[in-house]
């Protein structure tokens, strides 16, 4: 039996729907999702088995103009994911169209060379006539082998994309066990579940001024697990917002994150959250390494 295996990097501007697409294709909540831009901070590997192909989907942070050390590390993670891939898939928000940031990313992909596909997402929100000029404009900037029109939120067109990826990855042995979904450690997945709830339940600069780390993971005799997680905030007022009146907000963040973790881990979870102020965490190499990032400078 001939098997295929290859890395597919999913690139795009913030909020293009890359993480939603990854989760849709793998059928699992591997990459956190929120309506806010720049939710994904590091590369997330999703392992998709399709026929005799193992497709290693690499969800990357949205590419934007960096300001902080954290920002630089996020953008560097995205482009590093592209360099290591057999195929690059540019995901574009069809409704947003050919904005300057999308134009810059497509131009960089064109200069990079290598195999690249174009995926227009959110096509359920845009009439077909508007898509043709968008496709033409993007192909002027990079030579895309294939173009797909999908809706990651409802799954329209995703099956066709997965089938095409299965045929496109190179021949070779599988690199991961067939029943694996990701290479992310459970400790990091737990921290990400908490961070997702911070993005969903807080507003303005608060989610961007926080980072989350799993401090301890204790297996219990009844097969449940105790997870202690620390939320680091950049400002004192962020801490008070996250905790909420009488601790109501942090309890709700913990409750919803625990529900998601129990579904993912398929067992009972005892989740305990602690909020600490740590000014300048987004400029600390140690904090960046804790979430799998490296500053390129």
Image: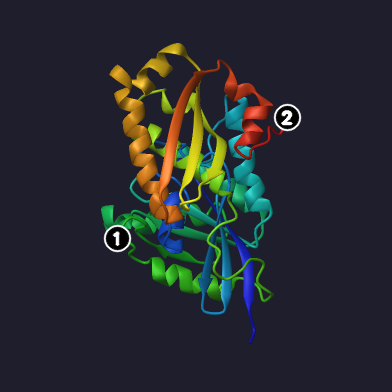
Q: Say above or below: 33 vs 212.
A: below
Which percent across, then down, holds residue 281?
58, 22
Q: Say above or below: 58 vs 252.
A: below
Q: Quarter of the image containing the C terminus? A: top right
Q: Residues within 10 Å of mark 1 (few under 14, many from 20)?
A: few
Q: Quarter of the image containing the N terminus? A: bottom right
Which percent across, then down, holds residue 119?
45, 59
Q: Given the current orientation, which residue lies at the most extreme top position?
A: 236
**Which residue occupies 65% across, 71% down?**
174
Which percent across, then down, holds residue 227?
49, 39
Mark sitting on residue 296: none
Q: Is mark 2 on a helix, strand or loop?
A: loop
Would you say 86 lies left or right of 51 here? right
Query: Label 2 near label 1: C-beta < 8 Å?
Result: no
User: What colouring method underlies this structural image?
Assistant: rainbow
**Which residue occupies 38% across, 35% down?**
254
**Which residue occupies 55% across, 31% down?**
65
The residue lying toward the viewer, choosing from 166 and 106, is 166
How far is the residue under mark 1 from the one under mark 2?
A: 43 Å
Say whether residue 13 is visible: no
Say whether residue 116 is visible: yes
Q: Given the current orientation, which residue lies at the most extreme bottom position?
A: 1
The residue lying toward the viewer, choosing from 76 and 3, is 3
Q: Is mark 1 on a helix, strand or loop?
A: helix
Q: Given the current orientation, which residue lies at the most extreme right position?
A: 297
The residue indicated by pointer 1 is: 128
Mark sitting on residue 297: 2
Which percent across, then down, holds residue 206?
41, 23
**Which residue occupies 40% across, 70% down?**
159
The residue lying toward the viewer, choosing from 252 and 159, is 252
Would you say 181 lies left or right of 131 here? right
- Nearer the observer, disc 1 or disc 2? 2
């Amino acid at each position: 039996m001939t098997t295929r295996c290859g890395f597919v990097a999913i690139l795009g501007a913030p909020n293009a729907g890359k993480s939603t697409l990854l989760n849709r294709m793998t059928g699992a909540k591997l990459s956190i999702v929120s309506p806010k831009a720049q939710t994904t901070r590091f590369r997330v590997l999703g392992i998709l088995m399709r026929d005799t192909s193992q497709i290693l989907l690499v969800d990357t942070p949205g590419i934007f103009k960096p300001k902080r050390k954290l920002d630089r590390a996020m953008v560097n993670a995205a482009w590093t994911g592209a360099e290591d891939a057999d195929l690059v898939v540019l995901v574009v928000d069809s409704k947003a169209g050919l904005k300057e940031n999308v134009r810059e990313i497509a131009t960089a992909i064109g200069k990079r060379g290598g195999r690249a596909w174009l995926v227009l997402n959110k096509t359920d929100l845009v009439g077909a006539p508007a898509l043709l000029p968008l496709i033409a404009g993007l192909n002027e900037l990079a030579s895309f082998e294939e173009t797909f029109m999908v809706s990651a939120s409802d799954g329209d067109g995703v099956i066709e994309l997965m089938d095409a990826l299965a045929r496109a990855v190179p021949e070779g042995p599988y690199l991961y066990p067939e029943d694996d979904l990701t290479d992310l450690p459970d400790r990091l997945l737990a921290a990400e579940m908490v961070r997702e709830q911070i993005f969903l339940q807080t507003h303005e600069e608060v989610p961007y001024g926080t980072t989350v780390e799993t401090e301890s993971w204790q297996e219990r005799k009844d097969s449940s697990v105790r997870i202690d997680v620390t939320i680091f905030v950049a400002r004192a007022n962020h801490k008070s917002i996250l905790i909420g009146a009488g601790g109501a907000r942090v309890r709700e963040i913990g409750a919803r994150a625990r529900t998601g973790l129990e579904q993912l881990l398929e067992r009972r979870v005892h989740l305990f959250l602690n909020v600490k102020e740590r000014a300048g965490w987004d400029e600390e190499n140690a904090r960046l390494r804790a979430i799998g990032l490296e500053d390129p400078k």
